[in-house]
Amino acid sequence: MSILKPTLAQRTLNGHLWLVYVFLYTPILVLMGLSFNSTGMPTAWGGFSTEWYGVLLDNDAVLNAALNTLIVAAVSTCLATLIGTLLAIGVERRQKASNAMEALLFAPMIIPDIVLAIALLSFFTLLNFTLGLYSIILSHVVFNIAFVCAVVRTRLKNFDFSIIEASIDLGAGEITTFRRVTLPAIFPGVLAGGLLAFTLSVDEFIIAYFTAGSSSTTLPMQIYSMIRFGVTPEINAMATIVMLVSFTLVFISQRIDRGQLET
């Protein structure tokens, strides 16, 4: 059995791929390495140490910001997953979605964050809504719904809606049918959408910055306030933890999403 050797074009594309990976991830790897720097210098290496992670855990401002981030991410993910899943089912059950409807669904995903942040701030100000964690949660729900809907719709592409009608014909109510028939079938897509929404909420800065008010600070906002005085190993340690959590959640989401497309 002969083994085909890669052509020049294939080798060129592979080389280009690895160059892109190096370009994208070298700064991240350098940042993660400097988080273990024993000296306080942002770039000069002085030896391996984990002391900055201990300093980070003793910082009350960072811990409070991390707690706020987890609260915002958890609550906004639950709401966005619920609404986005129901929206995806409603759209897919239509015979044909119009171009205008598709544009409205994807608009929050492609609108610049700064534009959406200003719009949300203006809306909250118009309603005299007190800014805080509640406003951040509602703002994150707004843009996360579109991402959840898009992920769940990929699962619904191969879903047979006739089983819903069969379940109702056999006497099951709509809620029972959704809980025992529809949801188990699309659950991998729902879980993948929820993980993606959680990741986006944890990492989001601009919208949270505009809608947080003066009393609530999320972790990305805390990083921004600290980095204005210079990059330190403590900031590198914090950024490393955030990136590892984000990469892990995105990886799990992609694995689930890939698995549902193969089934």
Image (cartoon, rainbow, N blue to C red):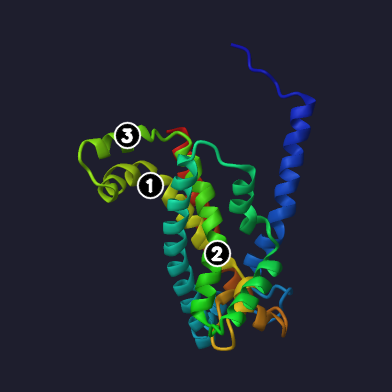
- Badge 1 or badge 2: first in the primary sequence: 2
SS for dot 2: helix
| Crowdedness near tag 1: few (<14), some (14–19) or many (≥20) residues, C-alpha within 10 Å | some
Spatial CA distance of label 2 from label 3 is 31 Å
Name the amino acid, label 3: Ile
Residue on which disc 3 sits = 163
Residue at 75% across, 31% down: 11
223 or 215: nearer the viewer: 215
The residue that disc 2 covers is: 142
Instruction: Name which quarter of the figure residue 28 lies in.
Output: bottom right
Indicate the amino acid at tag 2. Answer: Val
Q: Are marks 1 and 2 in contact (CB under 8 Å)?
A: no
Residue tagged 1: 187
Q: Nearer the viewer, residue 184 or 28?
A: 184
Q: Residue furthest top?
A: 1
Residue 244 visible at all: no
Label 3, label 1: how far apart the Cα atoms are: 16 Å
